[in-house]
Image (cartoon, rainbow, N blue to C red):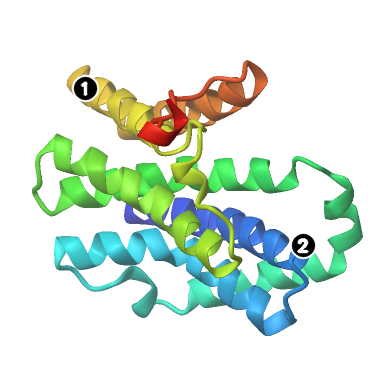
Amino acid sequence: MDSTFVSIIEIIGTLAFAISGIRLASAKQFDWFGAYVVGLVTAIGGGTLRDVLLNIPSFWMQDSVYLIVTGVALIAVIVLGKFLIKLQNTFFVFDTIGLALFVVVGIQKTLLVGYPFWVAIVMGTITGAFGGIIRDILINEEPLVFRKDIYALACVIGGVFYWIGFLLQLPDEITQSVAAASVIITRFAAVKYHWGLPVLHGDDDA
């Protein structure tokens, strides 16, 4: 796949995730620097863990564009803050877009270093979901991925669609687009129709 295309996906995903993180930080009344940090770790956290596990250089250490894009996201939230706050679904939309794009990037990078597809799906899920876990911890919220919500599972579904496209030998761009779309559709459908995984109850809840 064209490396330029991967870079574009990463930048768009970084912007989307950074906005989602900064938006939540603003709701908690963080200062500008704190909001920037939350946005940054939301955007690069999953990819950083992926690169550490794959034993490759962390992507954001090779190009400062990701730090710059996070700064752009901060400015966007500052300038358009009141407008974004009025849009109740702003966080969900940007978080879902970032999730979908980073799943694709995680899978692609894992395949490029020679790991099997099941590992690629796991790494795609980590790339998409782990930054959100760090974000929620920093803002003192229960991580979204651990709640009764279709989040990490949407990443897995995206990975399965990527695998199907790979088996059908579809063009890379189509395979990646279908995989990303499947993540977005799953997340939106889960919210619209109130889908969720069963909750594990302890003995005290019986």
Secondary-structure class at tag 2: helix
Residue pictured at 78% horizontal, 72% vertical: 29
Label 2 CA crowd tier, 10 Å (few <14, some 14–19, many 20+): few
Secondary-structure class at tag 1: loop
Residue 50: quarter of image: bottom left
Of 178 and 89, the residue lying toward us: 89
Of discs 2 and 1, which sits in the foreground? Answer: 2
Percent coordinates x, y for residue 63 in the rendering: 41, 77
What residue is disc 1 on? 169
Give the left or right position of residue 51, taking residue 187 as reference.
Answer: left
As drawn, 118 above or below 135: above
Residue pictured at 82% horizontal, 70% vertical: 78
Can residue 173 be seen from the camera position used here? no
Percent coordinates x, y for residue 24 in the rendering: 69, 59
Q: Quadrant of the N terminus?
A: top left
The Cα–Cα distance between marks 2 and 1, rounded to whole angstroms, is 45 Å
Checking the image for residue 139, the label placed there is none
Residue pictured at 25% horizontal, 20% vertical: 164
Can residue 192 be seen from the camera position used here? yes
As drawn, 60 above or below 135: below
What residue is disc 2 on? 27
Question: Which comes sooner in the sequence, label 2 or label 1?
Answer: 2
Give the left or right position of residue 142, taking residue 60 as reference.
Answer: right
Residue type at numbered disc 1: Gln
Residue type at numbered disc 2: Ala
Of 133 and 148, the residue lying toward us: 148
Percent coordinates x, y for residue 172 in the rendering: 31, 34
Residue pictured at 40% horizontal, 55% vertical: 130
